[in-house]
Image (cartoon, rainbow, N blue to C red):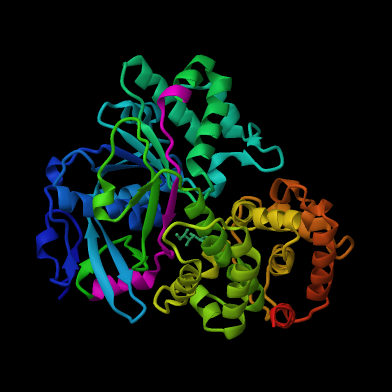
Amino acid sequence: MNTTIQLNQKNLHNLPDSFVVPKYDRSQLKAGIVHIGVGGFHRSHEACYNDDFLTLSQSTEWGICGMGLREADRKIGDILKQQDYLYTLIVKHPDGRQENRVIGSIVDFVLASDDPAAATDRLADAQTKIVSLTITEGGYHFNPATNAFDFDHPDVQHDLVNPHAPKMIFGFLTEALRKRRAKGLPAFTIQSCDNIQHNGDMTRKMLLAFAEKQDPTLAQWISSSVSFPNAMVDRITPMTTLQDITLLEEAGVQDLWPVTCEPFTQWIIEDHFSDGRPDWESVGAQFVGDVTPYELMKIRLLNAGHSVLGLLGSVHGHATIDGCIADPLFASYVRRFMDVEVTPILAPVDEINLDEYKSTLIERFGNPNIKDNLARICLESSSKLPKFIVPTIMENLEKGGSIKFAALVIAAWCYYSDKGVSKNGVALDIVDDMKAELHSYASKTEQDSLAFLKLDSVFGDLVQSKTFTDEYVAMVRTLYTNRDIAAQMDVLLGESLLLTA
Ligand code: CS2
């Protein structure tokens, strides 16, 4: 007999006792927030804060309407709809404990590619007060080589001349704000939740660049009316696996797309919103005047630390972040990278002890139940490294700081992009919009050791720095002449420890 209960509103109160369920009236809930990009991270982070907020406040204003802009988002939309937008957040503790928590804050989903006009209507509705985004680091159409909006993408070109039937994020936001202004409504806040330094400022700059070209008067209104609070977001959220779905089934619940995450969560936001906001501070978010030191600390230590382990670990043959941390060489390497190359460029952060923060990061990375796959970490490295690691190298070059630990990561990324297999012969699962370009530059390394660095849309003018290229060339040559990457890491660590002895 199959006793599995399908997750949906009707069954909510028949779930096993071990499932925590929403304790507020979802039927009354209006969507004050439209969230674009309903991936695992949104569902473990903002939607979870909001679930806590709705429980505490019993507010009826701040439900979330999910929105997907691409055909690829159809699957999550369909599954959520089938489950009355409910899903399980599986919080995995390091000691093996697991909390199964049903999140109820999402109440609707719109697939914008099906009907762009309906989607912009939804955004322009008076009920929508905040439009939040997780569109990935690459979704902002920012070109680091020109330091400006990248108009080359075909969807951008399409949206410039088809304002009423947009395809990409800035086309949707511009059209929605045009409708909003025509109705005499206040502008919504645009709240970025991506790992980009000054993510609000970046969103503003990219949106204005696009809107300026399409409709300059509207751009002026956007510039004076829309708020773009910067924010630092944090919760490690691995990809959902079949095993997660099976474990829930064994516990008696069928959920077609749960999300897993670590217990730690953090959200630090600048407090300027154009049309109101939930009191997220009542459920643990922090509002500050200037988020700069927090975001710098998080992106340059956590996200960069992930990329360090992800690329070196993939080339070495590790599979997960906790697998890397269980290897003392990798654990010491990432900590040393944080201490020697990142800490000196960080501004002090109020009330945060950096040493403790870094130790907590290593503990979080080591959570053996999270099993964060290195393929997820290395996914779209071409948009991550220019934000997580390259700026650290540039700042160290300016200040005469160490760049060796990061240089080996870039050398490993070159090898990874070129060969597509680890040193122990395992094929790597590389997913990157720039995969072909990365491969094409990296594959010339044997003739020209600097070939990979010449990809300026990723590295800017890093290749011009002799201090950097001297280190990099030596490393890439050693790596290509088949020396084990672990041996190179060991040498760097040894040298660095000797220097401080
Ligand atoms: C990761 C992030 O994608 C990545 O490379 O570093 O997804 C990271 O897990 C989150 O930012 C944690 O807050």
Q: Is residue 235 magenta?
A: yes
- Where 260 sits versus 173, above or below? below
Taking depth in this image into account, of 198 and 177 the one nearest to the observer is 198
Q: Is residue 469 left or right of residue 240?
A: right
Q: Position of residue 376 (x, y in %)?
A: 52, 63
Taking depth in this image into account, of 57 and 115 the one nearest to the observer is 57
- Where 177 sits versus 411, above or below? above
Q: Position of residue 466 (x, y in %)?
A: 85, 58
Q: Is residue 181 left or right of residue 171?
A: left
The residue sitting at the right extreme is 447
When asked about the image quadrant of residue 352, the answer is bottom left
Q: Is residue 417 magenta?
A: no
When asked about the image quadrant of residue 439, the answer is bottom right
- Where 241 sits versus 168, above or below? below
Q: Is residue 228 visible?
A: yes
The magenta-colored residue range is 223-250
- Where 426 sits versus 203, above or below? below
- Image quadrant in which the C terminus is located: bottom right
Q: Position of residue 102 (x, y in %)?
A: 22, 60
Instruction: Tell me the residue at 42%/76% (across/down).
Output: 367
Taking depth in this image into account, of 16 and 427 the one nearest to the observer is 16
- Image quadrant in which the N terminus is located: bottom left
Instruction: Tell me the residue at 41%/73% (across/down).
Output: 370
Number of numbered discs on residues: 0
When asked about the image quadrant of residue 441, the answer is bottom right
Q: Is residue 83 visible?
A: no
Q: Is residue 41 left or right of residue 2?
A: right
Q: Position of residue 278 (x, y in %)?
A: 26, 42
